[in-house]
Image (spheres, rainbow, N blue to C red):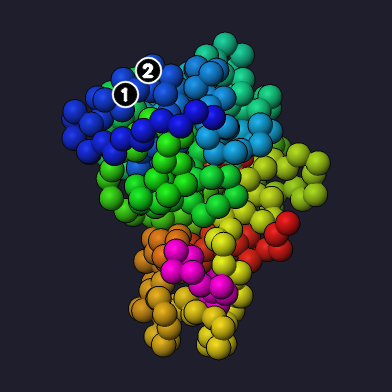
Amino acid sequence: MDRQITTKLPNTPAGISRASDLLNSGQLVAFATETVYGLGADARNDTAVAQIFSAKGRPQFNPLIVHVASLAAAQKLAAFSPQALALATAFWPGPLTLVLPLLPDSPISPRVSAGLPTLALRVPAHPMAHDLLTEFDGPIAAPSANISGKISPTSPDHVLDGLSGHIAAVLDAGPCPVGLESTIIGFDPVPTLLRPGGLPAEIIENCISQPLAAPPTQQPMPNAPGQLASHYAPTAKIRLNADQARPDEVLLGFGAVPCDLNLSPSADLAQAAANLFRHLHALDANGAKIIAVSAIPDTGLGRAINDRLKRAAAPRD
Ligand code: TXA
Ligand code: MG
């Protein structure tokens, strides 16, 4: 793909307006959401959506999440069951993505869903995402703004590290407050946790008064293809559940432990989530060969943190 100059745009009305113009002209713009930075394109523009896949090196079969400004806008694109409506009403705007049947007359480019009859939708809570969606006044397709298979970006500099020269602009809103991607829920045929994320599964189960099913495993094309084993991989190797660093390792700690970087000295899971990708990026950039990571409790946001760590530790090609 041709190289271009990537502009850093400020989080001001002028910056948002410029970003919206770029999207309208079919270009790619990265922007902050409360979870991670998204790589946005006009979801109705086939060519723009195709560029997302080439800029990221993303396989064409891996569908994208569409971001909209409101539940009303989402209801024009996909069919909401009563349970989906209950979740959207309770948690939007917020770090929750719903996979729903695509409406037949939806204007979304078929590339977005990679040919599936469903659409992943979310209303983000970050003021920048909200302002951009309001100004653009249309659906924005946006995967995480990283090269496919690498750690997701939680700052504009992470975005530029991977995608500078391949996208028109990145809007700068500083670090993302949640720091982990959205929780993805499907409904085919029962409410299913397709990806643990920024909204803890227990809170969702409380809302619908039923447990979430586990995603089907070992399908030729998984329901959430981004869930393939080696994903979110830093260059360094990862060793999980470490008590202390071995001589050739750095320790990414959790709680009151001596370590090189700490996810949360007070063992707070929300703080650990917000720091996870930033600390992995930092240790990786420092040239760590092996990152040992303290054990993280497997409840609430800890489930999503452990999911990302397991994928980062998975064997690679
Ligand atoms: O927090 C987030 O969700 C961020 C921000 C930018 O919104 N986005 C994000 O997108 O994490 P991405 O592309 O990195 O992950 C989207 C996931 C992928 O695993 C993809 O397979 C799944 O959503 N997905 C998208 N459409 C789907 C569909 N129709 N059915 C099942 N899974 C779908
Ligand atoms: Mg991603």
Is residue 297 one of those drawn in magenta? yes
Q: Quadrant of residue 169?
A: top left
The kind of residue on which mark 2 rests is Asn
Residue 308 painted magenta: no
Q: Element under label 2?
A: helix
Q: State which quadrant residue 11 falls in.
A: top left
Residue 175 point in image, percent of width and height: 32, 53
Q: Nearer the viewer, residue 270 or 59?
A: 59
Q: Is residue 214 visible in this depiction of the protein?
A: yes
Q: Quadrant of the C terminus?
A: bottom right
Within 10 Å of disc 2 (Cα), the crowding (few <14, some 14-19, many 20+) is some
Residue in the foreground of this view, choosing between 88 and 61: 61
Please report the bounds of the magenta region as a residue range.
Answer: 284-299
Q: Disc 1 marks which residue?
A: 20
Label annotation for residue 226: none
Left or right relative to 263: residue 315? right
Let me know if residue 40 appears in the view.
no
Residue occupying image coordinates x 56% and y 73%: 289
Task: Give the residue at the far left of this rendering.
Answer: 13
Place of residue 201 in the rendered image (x, y in percent of width and height, measured from the top left): 54, 55
Residue at 26% from the left image edge and 36% from the top image edge = 9
Q: Are the two marked residues, 1 and 2, in contact with CB atoms closer than 8 angstroms? A: yes
The secondary structure that most of the magenta stretch takes on is loop
